């Protein structure tokens, strides 16, 4: 009987885990959306997100172009990222260190921005 439970657990747990991760990601994305809303108008002065803000620098579709690490680097060290990408954005984006946005909020914001895929 114990071996049946062990086998059942080995079959069921891998099927359930992706659902838990998906739910966690959904929660993180929603938190990131809230983080972005709390920063307005700072972000939307230069960037458009979900059609709101400055259309010259849209972030919609950024989830198709950048990794979470790249998004975080653009937020923490924008001058270095701009030099690496040969970006000519004016004015240059200001850095948001841990004193301005916590690591947890940065993770959430990156998750939200990653969810912004290009419409097909």
Image (tube, helix red, strand yellow):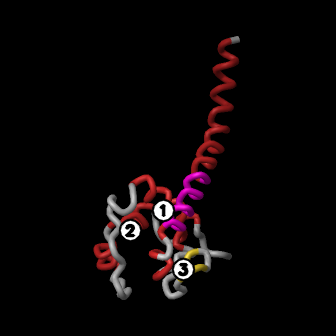
Dot 3: few (<14), some (14–19), or many (≥20) neighbours within 10 Å? Answer: some
Dot 2: few (<14), some (14–19), or many (≥20) neighbours within 10 Å? Answer: many
Q: Is residue 33 magenta?
A: yes
Mark 3 and mark 2: span between their CA atoms? 15 Å
Q: Which residues are magenta?
A: 26-38
Name the chief secondary structure element in magenta.
helix
**Which residue shows up at 61% across the image and 53% down it?**
26
On the image, numbered disc 3 is attached to which residue?
48
Which sits in the foreground, 107 or 99?
Answer: 99
Q: Which mark is residue 110?
A: 1
**Which residue shows up at 66% across the image and 38% down it?**
16
Q: Earlier along the polypeptide chain: callout 2 or callout 1?
A: 2
In the picture shown, does residue 87 fall above or below 13? below
* Location of the N terminus (image quadrant): top right
Question: CB atoms at circles 2 and 1 under 8 Å apart?
Answer: yes
* Location of the C terminus (image quadrant): bottom right
Q: Earlier along the polypeptide chain: callout 3 or callout 1?
A: 3
Where does the image place residue 28, in percent across and percent down from the top left?
A: 55, 53
> Which quadrant of the figure has residue 19?
top right
Mark 2 and mark 1: span between their CA atoms? 9 Å
**Which residue shows up at 50% across the image and 78% down it?**
44
* Residue at disc 3, secondary structure: strand
On the image, numbered disc 2 is attached to which residue?
75
In the picture shown, does residue 81 fall above or below 98? below
**Which residue shows up at 56% across the image and 63% down it?**
33
Where does the image place residue 5, in percent across and percent down from the top left?
A: 68, 19
Q: Is residue 54 magenta?
A: no
């Amino acid at each position: 009987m114990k071996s049946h439970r062990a086998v059942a657990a080995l079959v069921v747990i891998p099927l359930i885990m992706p659902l838990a991760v998906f739910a966690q990601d959904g929660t993180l994305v929603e938190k990131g959306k809230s983080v972005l809303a709390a920063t307005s108008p700072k972000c939307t002065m230069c960037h458009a997100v979900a059609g709101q803000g400055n259309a010259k620098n849209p972030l919609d579709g950024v989830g198709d172009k950048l990794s979470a690490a790249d998004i975080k680097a653009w937020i923490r060290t924008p001058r270095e990222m701009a030099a690496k990408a040969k970006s000519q954005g004016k004015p240059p984006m200001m850095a948001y260190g841990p004193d301005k946005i916590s690591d947890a909020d940065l993770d959430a914001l990156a998750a939200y921005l990653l969810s912004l895929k290009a419409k097909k």
